[in-house]
Image (cartoon, rainbow, N blue to C red):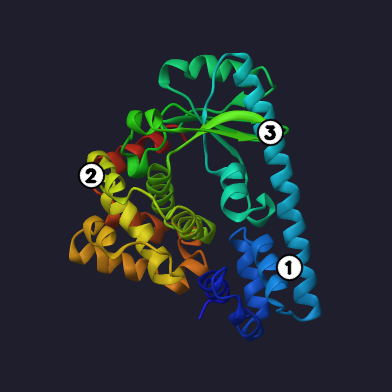
């Protein structure tokens, strides 16, 4: 049994089992938590449950957690500066993932690694938003994706989205998602966030697009489903059907339910489920062992094969591969 998955399955609903779980493979738990950006959460959960790790493992977990916390502070600072720059240009973006999500779901941004800032503005505002962010000293990288541009600077990376996501090369415009977005605030700065059902769908599709190679992305789904008991599941199903993302959402939500005991209703999984052979393939591809080891991240041929196998349609994925090849 993968040590980190065992912890994520138990926490926060069954903390009484963590002391025994932590004693089974303490070094593995620390390594996996670091690999998946969840050292802060693991440290918090073990301390709250009274679990103890051997001295060297405890020290390594503490150091990893401090490193991720420092990174989250830098990302939050960059988010604040970015929101200020956009506000000065008269723009209020949707903030996707990142520090605000960690603060809402985990209660502490240091419990979940955040590496960059993701902001979404309408396509008509994208040029003005990019100009505002470049005024901070950020510089745009050559565009490889149709839906966002990456702006890099000494403080970190900002992904400026014209569209929320393009999973497996399929562009999702997301106009309805933006219309339903909610007002939010981080660090005293106003922005927007997706409605709960749209956010869960987006996070699931994003996780599948990256083949679930960070368990934090899968655990996000569990925490969001727990935090939103009145989540509009029927609207999620309708949006998934309209955007052609039902199968992509299934792969991540099924893994969250199957491996982490996320409270995803059975009828929702049944409605999202793709063909029998694709669902069976996904269960093997996204096994406990492969996810805990981030297997696909280290095996490029297997990554490509899995993407081709799970792609809703092959042509958009081939188009994305060609664009990346052509631009080097």
Left or right, residue 274 beside residue 129? left
Residue 303: x, y in percent? 40, 57
Would you say the residues marked 1 and 3 are in contact, meaning their CB atoms lie under 8 Å apart?
no
- Marks 2 and 3, Cα distance to the nearest angstrom? 35 Å
The Cα atoms of the two marked residues, 1 and 3, are separated by 26 Å
| Res 305 label | none
Instruction: Find residue 89 and report its horizontal and vertical position in percent.
Output: 59, 13
In screen coordinates, is 286 left or right of 236? right
Residue in front for this viewpoint, 235 or 324: 235
Bin the neighbour count of mark 1 within 10 Å (Cα to Cα): few under 14, some 14-19, many 20 and up: many
Residue found 24% across the figure and 49% down from its top: 312
Secondary structure, mark 2, is: helix
Q: State whether residue 265 is above or below residue 18.
A: above
* Residue shown at the point (33%, 40%) measured from the top left: 169
Q: Considering only order in the chain, which callout, 3 or 1, is on the residue closer to the N terminus?
A: 1
The residue tagged 2 is 241
Q: Position of residue 198 (x, y in %)?
A: 38, 42
Instruction: Categorize mark 3 by other alpha carbons within 10 Å: few (<14), some (14-19), many (20+).
Output: many
Mark 2 vs mark 3, foreground winner is 2
Q: Earlier in the sequence, mark 1 or mark 2?
A: 1
How far from the left and from the top, in percent, is residue 289?
46, 74
Numbered-mark total:
3
Residue 43 falls in which quadrant of the image? bottom right
Disc marking residue 61: 1
**Residue 59 seen in the current view:** yes
Q: Circle 1 sits in a helix, a strand or a loop, which is it? A: helix
Between the C-alphas of marks 1 and 2, the distance is: 42 Å
Q: Nearer the viewer, mark 1 or mark 2?
A: 2
Residue 162 higher or lower than 15, as above or below: above
- Residue matched to label 3: 78
Q: Secondary structure at mark 3?
A: helix
> How packed is label 2: few (under 14 Cα within 10 Å), some, or many (20 or more)?
some
């Amino acid at each position: 049994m993968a040590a980190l998955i065992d912890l994520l399955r138990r926490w926060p609903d069954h903390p009484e089992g963590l002391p025994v779980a932590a004693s089974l493979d303490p070094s593995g738990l620390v390594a996996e938590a670091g690999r998946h950006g969840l050292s802060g959460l693991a440290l918090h959960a073990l301390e709250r449950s009274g679990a103890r790790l051997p001295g060297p493992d405890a020290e390594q977990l503490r150091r990893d957690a401090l490193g991720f916390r420092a990174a989250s502070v830098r990302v939050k600072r960059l988010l604040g500066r970015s929101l200020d720059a956009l506000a000065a240009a008269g723009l209020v973006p949707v903030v996707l993932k990142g520090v605000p999500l960690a603060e809402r779901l985990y209660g502490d941004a240091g419990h979940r690694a955040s590496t960059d800032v993701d902001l979404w503005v309408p396509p008509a505002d994208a040029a003005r938003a990019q100009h505002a962010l470049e005024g901070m000293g950020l510089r745009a990288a050559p565009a490889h994706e149709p839906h966002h541009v990456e702006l890099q600077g000494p403080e970190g990376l900002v992904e400026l989205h014209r569209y929320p996501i393009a999973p497996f090369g399929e562009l999702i415009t997301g106009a309805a998602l933006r219309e339903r977005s909610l007002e939010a605030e981080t660090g005293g700065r106003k922005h927007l966030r997706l409605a709960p059902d749209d956010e869960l769908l987006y996070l699931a599709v994003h996780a599948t697009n990256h083949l679930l190679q960070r368990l934090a992305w899968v655990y996000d789904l569990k925490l969001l489903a727990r935090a939103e008991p009145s989540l509009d599941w029927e609207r999620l199903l309708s949006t998934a059907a309209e955007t052609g993302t039902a199968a992509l959402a299934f792969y991540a939500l099924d893994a969250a339910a199957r491996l982490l005991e996320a409270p995803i209703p059975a009828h929702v999984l049944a409605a999202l489920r793709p063909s029998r052979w694709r669902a069976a393939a996904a269960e093997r591809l996204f096994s406990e062992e492969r996810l805990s080891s981030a297997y696909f991240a280290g095996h490029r041929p297997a990554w490509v094969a899995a993407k081709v196998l799970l792609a809703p349609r092959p042509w958009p994925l081939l188009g994305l591969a060609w664009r990346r090849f052509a631009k080097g």
